[in-house]
Each structure stands twice: as structure tokens, then as C-alpha cells.
Amino acid sequence: MYNSLSPKMDFGAIAKASGVSFSNEAKESQKASLTNADYLRASCAKMQLGIGPRDHEECPHRVTFDFYAPSDSSALEVAILAAYRHVHGNCYVMSNERATELESQLGDGRISMREFVRGLVKREFYKDRFLSSVAPQRGIELAFKHLLGRPPLNQQEVAAAIAIQAEHGYDVMVDNLVDSAEYSEVFGSDTVPYGRAWTSASGMPMINFVRMAALEQNFVTSDRTNGSASILLNNLTKGTALPIKVSARVSYVGVSAAWGSGKPPAHFEKLWRGLALVGGAHLAGMTINVMSQIAGFNGLDRIPALFLGK
């Protein structure tokens, strides 16, 4: 029996792909719009848009669905840890490396989960690991994975993001992804981004499953240990095959918890040895009796009668 019936488990898809959310909008403070993106978000927040499909030109920065998002302290901690794990590509963040100011603002309702994620990706902690120390194409494919939960659909998406970064800077490229209609419709303001290329999502080709698997490699690794060079470059430009490192499947047999270290409980072992001894003695007696009769000696036939008192 295998430890997994779904290939998604080999890459941690079931464990990672989940919609963890947190909302404290009641306390979120109003602030002046400093950029066009801020103005668009503020304007859309005041619009009473119905649930369902719509034209993105109407308001490209407003989520179109409603869902319950918890606001208690335990949900806050779960959401923060999920954000650290996904945004940093399963890279462990020590306590002194956490964004305490952003965490405080999120807990107080001064920023939403979307702004918390934006802040994490713009920190020097993130840039040192996924921008300055990797190839440009690698940084872009990781930004798509960490912010939109998917790999780039084609090389044109990568080239466009690189052009924005080269002309306007890294922070503007991040804003372009976080403020996109796709981010709004998939994650909204309260949901932590997660890997969503494991299913046949609308608008994404099936090859994205393979590309996501190549980026993920397996459940236990982080995006830092998967190298600094682009993983998807040759596949996006030339259509070459993608290398995927899948963890070996482990076969197992379900046994009782009483069987420790492959050995049965002590009383079962004593019983087995006793039955084996009795059975062995009986078999040896039968063998000796048969051999004696073949040799013409029938004296052993009286032994059972002696035990029966006859």
C-alpha cells in the first residue's frame, strides 16, 4: 500500500493549497491615497458590487465574491504563519526575522492581509533571498508563485514583468501583481496566497500542473534550496521537458501500536513459542512412529494406550 494515492501529495499540494484567511476590517483605518493604485482600491471599496462575473474595466481592484474570514487572535497567528510559509517558499523564518511591525498593523486592522503580503515581499529579508541572489527570470517566476500561486503562463508574462521591473523598479512590479484583477478575484483582501496550479483552474493550461511541480520539486524543500537559476526558462521558450524531483514512495503495512520495533508483545511471543514447541514435539513423535513401523517394529503403538490407561 502506498503512502499516497494522489500525485499531488508528492509535492505537498494537499498540505499547502488551502485558503487561510483573516479579516479585521472593522478597525481598518482610512488613509489618504498616495498612488493611483491606492485611489482605485479606495474607490472600489465604496462601490456596492454584486457577487458574480463582471467586466474588469468596471473596477479591476475589487473582489467579486464574499466569504467568512475569522478575526480572532488564533486565526491571526495561523494566517501569519501561512503567509510566511508561502510567501517565502517554505523557507524558515526565525523569530527575530519576522515582520513584527506588519504583524501588529494586521492585527490592529490598519492593513489587510493583501497589504501584509505586499509588505512581506518588499522586505529586505525577501529581496536578499529571492531577488538579489537569483537570476532575473528566477526572481520573476518566484514572484508569480509567491503572489499569484501559479507559475508564469508563458514567456511573454515573464518578459513583461522584467520590463516593468527594469523601467520602474522591483516594488512597482510587485504592486502590478498584487493589485491585479487576478489576485483580487482569487484571494481578495483577506486570503493568504497559496499554490493553485494543482487543479484545472480557468484560464490556465494543464502544463501549469507540471510547471508548478517543477517549481515545488517536493514538499520538504524550500525555494532557496532549488537553485538560483530559472527552472522554467527552457520550457517556456523552447518547450523542453521539466526536471521534477519526486520523493520516493514508501510502502507500509498497518499494524497494531502494541507491535514496537517490529516485534510482537511479550505474551504473544510466549504463546507462539509454546505452540511451536508442542507442534514440533508432536510432529517428531509421528515421524519416529512411522519410521518404526516401516522398519517392522510396532512397540511404539502401545505408547498412546499407556497414556490413556489401557
Image: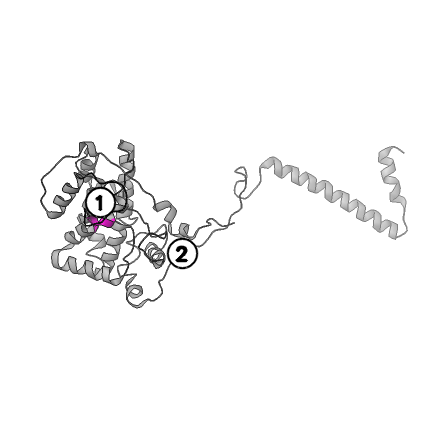
The residue that mark 2 highlights is 246
Left or right: where 188 falls relative to 32: right
- Residue farthest along the bottom direction in this orientation: 238
179 magenta-colored: yes
Image point 73% across, 40% down: which residue?
Answer: 278
Element at badge 1? helix
Element at badge 2? loop
C-alpha gap between disc 2 and disc 1: 29 Å
Is residue 129 shown to the viewer in this render?
yes
Q: Main secondary structure of the magenta part?
A: helix
Identified by mark 2, the residue type is Val
* For the residues bearing labels 2 and 1, Cβ distance under 8 angstroms: no
Left or right: where 44 falls relative to 141: left
Sooner in the amino-acid sequence: mark 2 or mark 1 = 1
Q: Nearer the viewer, mark 2 or mark 1?
A: 1
The residue that mark 1 highlights is 117
Label 2 neighbour load within 10 Å: few <14, some 14-19, many 20+:
some
Is residue 135 shown to the viewer in this render?
no
Image point 33% across, 54% down: which residue?
Answer: 216
Residue 306 in picture, x, y percent from top left: 87, 36
On residue 108, which mark appears?
Answer: none
265 magenta-colored: no
Image: magenta residue range = 177-182
Identified by mark 1, the residue type is Val
